Image: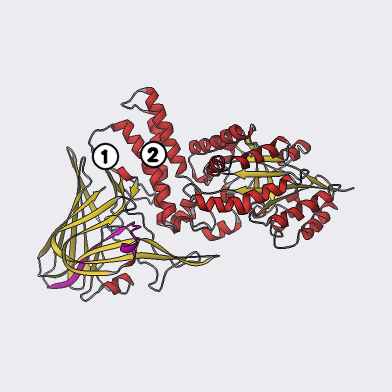
């Protein structure tokens, strides 16, 4: 009788930082029913992937479930897939971090279940040839890969039921195609339809293998019927784990598969996963921060520190742990659940990245006060950014984007105070009636607007420019002296009646969380100019009252925003009274559940109505203070 080999798989993951009640609901509704049904059908074999954070949670709250998985493993009914511990997108990580993530999950599986995985699951099915060597070096022999990858490489449909071998500079990795047409049947169609399709496939003969990943949200009753039907037809269905199949079949077709992802992920990205970093500057900011922290840790391993060797190794491991926690995939793209769109997701990533960076600086600087300046291409756009750091703050500036401040980390609380999100017009994240944003939601963005512009015009992007400064190129002159760094940004642009120049100087001091911004706006023409000037601050904020109110306050020379949940306050003191516009940054997330409003942060926009004679200047000083 002709037979068909059948590999059933399941993928279980929860991002770090997910609330306990959400994971508990998934456990009761999905994970437990699935494996409980499997227990009742001992002749059905499964391969399963659990991310490391989810295993930690299950170990802590449901030891009985871990025991169930142990029992299934002992009776050779369950094979675990490895992968990245915190479910990272492996190809976007530095090689050392890939290996570290793979090793962590292998060790966790070995500790709990006394087995070491030889297969791996790729988060969001993102694959690139450069991961082959790292997988091989960590003991991974095979991966399960969506048939979409092989179809893009023009591999014949009939070949998709046979094993493949991937090659990269002599490093080898086996692969089995996950068959999307079978996956789509479950649970859309009754289980008997899937079995009938398997019967047709079995008629082709040979050691063909059908690989089906099952949605963990399928109801237990449906699963029991499916498992029962498979058991009733084991005369021609061979239920196997991947390891069992590779013991039977050693021959594999060599293929070369290019970079790619799951079909829906690739379509949304526009091809390569890394396209998300050009589509969303917010994702690129987290990604480049992650790469920066990773590089600092690697340099620290090779360099010298001011602490004893044992303490040094412990702190480096702790920093690596924080880094790995920040690499969970949802922080780098607009995932089905919201991903990068969600403030809590971004905050989780930044929190771990800043914590890791703090550990690095603790080893290199101890408790010393310092104020350092770096000029480098931080965001990978081919232009230099200017980074200032002291014991309490990181402040990152972009001279090419309006001399703006795009990251401001308050180190004692591991928080990026500028972690906001712009309004985009696209399928996943749609703007509200106000439309999409003209500019990124960064800070110290200078706006020179026509007279009569009001808060509603500004908030709804219906204003007219008097002169173009906001995202323009500023020159920068950095100055360093003991315990102090200052940056002087300047730009000249043409207004309706002639040239206008803005200069702003940001000054930071060692050991201080406050900094000074000095502005000079000069009419460089010989004609009168009347306009509105303001500088925009976009702050991440979860204070409900602050995130809901639109305010236009006249004649203020100071304002303080306090967030009880984060335990941080930000104050602005102005040398000249201003009108203060304050309003929430609100986006809407469109997904299967409908439309959800997201409070991304708050805009604080001090502005002045100016009337400058030819050659006249307006000067104002802003002191920004940050406190616990």
270 drawn magenta: no
- Which segment did they paint magenta? 528-547
Q: Residue furthest right?
A: 1
Question: Residue 102, image x and y in percent?
Answer: 55, 37
- Residue depicted at 32% across the width and 35% down the height: 361
Q: Residues within 10 Å of mark 1 (few under 14, many from 20)?
A: many
- Residue depicted at 25% across the width and 64% down the height: 605
Mark 1 — residue? 391
The reply to whether residue 447 is in sight is: yes
Secondary structure state at the residue bearing disc 1: loop
Foreground residue, 626 or 129?
626
Q: Reading the chain from its start, which is encountered first: label 1 or label 2?
A: 2
Residue 470 circle label: none
Question: Residue 546, image x and y in percent?
Answer: 30, 62
Residue 356 circle label: 2
Asked whether the residues under the numbered discs 1 and 2 touch, taking CB atoms below 8 Å apart as contact, a structural biologist would say: no
Secondary structure state at the residue bearing disc 2: helix
Question: Residue 152, image x and y in percent?
Answer: 64, 55
């Amino acid at each position: 009788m002709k037979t068909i080999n059948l590999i059933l798989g399941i993928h279980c993951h929860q991002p770090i930082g997910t609330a306990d009640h959400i994971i508990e609901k998934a456990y009761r509704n999905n994970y437990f029913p699935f494996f409980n049904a499997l227990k009742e059908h001992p002749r059905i074999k499964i391969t399963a992937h659990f991310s490391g954070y989810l295993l930690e949670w299950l170990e802590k709250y449901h030891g009985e479930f871990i025991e169930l998985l142990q029992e299934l493993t002992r009776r050779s009914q369950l094979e675990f897939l490895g992968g990245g511990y915190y479910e990272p997108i492996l190809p976007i990580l530095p090689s050392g971090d890939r290996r570290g993530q793979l090793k962590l999950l292998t060790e966790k599986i070995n500790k709990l279940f006394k087995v070491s995985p030889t297969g791996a699951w790729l988060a969001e099915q993102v694959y690139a040839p450069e991961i082959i060597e790292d997988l091989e070096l960590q003991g991974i022999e095979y991966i399960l890969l969506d048939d979409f990858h092989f179809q893009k490489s023009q591999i014949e449909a009939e070949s998709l039921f046979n094993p493949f071998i991937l090659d990269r500079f002599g490093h080898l990795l086996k692969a089995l195609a996950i068959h999307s047409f079978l996956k789509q049947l479950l649970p859309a169609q009754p289980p008997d339809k899937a079995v009938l399709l398997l019967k047709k496939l079995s008629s082709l003969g040979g050691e063909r293998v059908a690989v089906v990943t099952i949605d963990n949200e399928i109801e237990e009753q449906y699963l029991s019927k499916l498992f029962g039907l498979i058991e009733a037809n084991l005369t021609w269905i061979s239920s196997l784990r991947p390891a069992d199949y590779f013991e039977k079949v050693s021959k594999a077709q060599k293929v070369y598969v290019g970079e790619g992802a799951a079909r829906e992920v690739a379509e949304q990205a526009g091809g390569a996963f890394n396209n998300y970093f050009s589509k969303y500057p917010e994702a690129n900011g987290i990604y480049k921060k992650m790469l920066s922290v990773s590089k600092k840790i690697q340099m620290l391993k090779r360099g010298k520190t001011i602490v004893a060797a044992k303490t040094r190794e412990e702190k480096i491991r702790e920093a690596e742990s924080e880094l790995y926690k920040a690499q969970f995939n949802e922080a780098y793209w607009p995932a089905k659940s919201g991903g990068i769109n969600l403030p809590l997701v971004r905050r989780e990533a930044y929190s771990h990245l800043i914590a890791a960076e703090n550990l690095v600086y603790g080893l290199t600087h101890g408790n010393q006060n310092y104020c350092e300046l770096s000029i480098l291409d931080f965001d990978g756009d081919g232009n230099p950014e200017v980074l200032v750091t002291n014991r309490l703050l990181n402040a990152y500036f972009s001279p090419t984007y309006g001399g703006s401040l795009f990251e401001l980390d308050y180190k004692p609380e591991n928080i990026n105070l500028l972690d906001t999100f712009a309004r985009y017009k696209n399928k996943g994240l749609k703007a509200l009636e106000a439309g999409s944003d003209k500019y990124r939601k960064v800070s110290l963005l200078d706006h020179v607007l026509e007279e009569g512009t009001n808060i509603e015009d500004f908030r709804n992007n219906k204003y007219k420019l008097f002169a173009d400064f906001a995202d323009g190129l500023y020159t920068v002159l950095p100055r360093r002296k003991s315990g102090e760094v200052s940056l002087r940004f300047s730009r000249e642009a043409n207004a309706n009646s002639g040239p206008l120049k803005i200069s702003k100087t940001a000054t930071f001091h060692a050991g201080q969380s406050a900094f000074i911004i000095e502005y000079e706006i000069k009419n460089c023409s010989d004609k009168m100019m009347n306009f509105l000037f303001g500088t925009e601050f976009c702050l991440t904020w979860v204070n409900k009252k602050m995130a809901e109110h639109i305010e236009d306050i006249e004649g203020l020379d100071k304002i303080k925003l306090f967030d009880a949940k984060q335990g941080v306050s930000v104050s602005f003191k102005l040398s000249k009274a201003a009108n203060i516009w304050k309003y929430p940054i609100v986006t809407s997330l469109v997904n299967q559940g409908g439309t959800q409003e997201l409070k991304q942060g708050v805009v604080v926009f001090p502005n002045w109505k100016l009337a400058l004679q030819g050659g006249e200047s307006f000067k104002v000083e802003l002191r920004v203070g940050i406190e616990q």
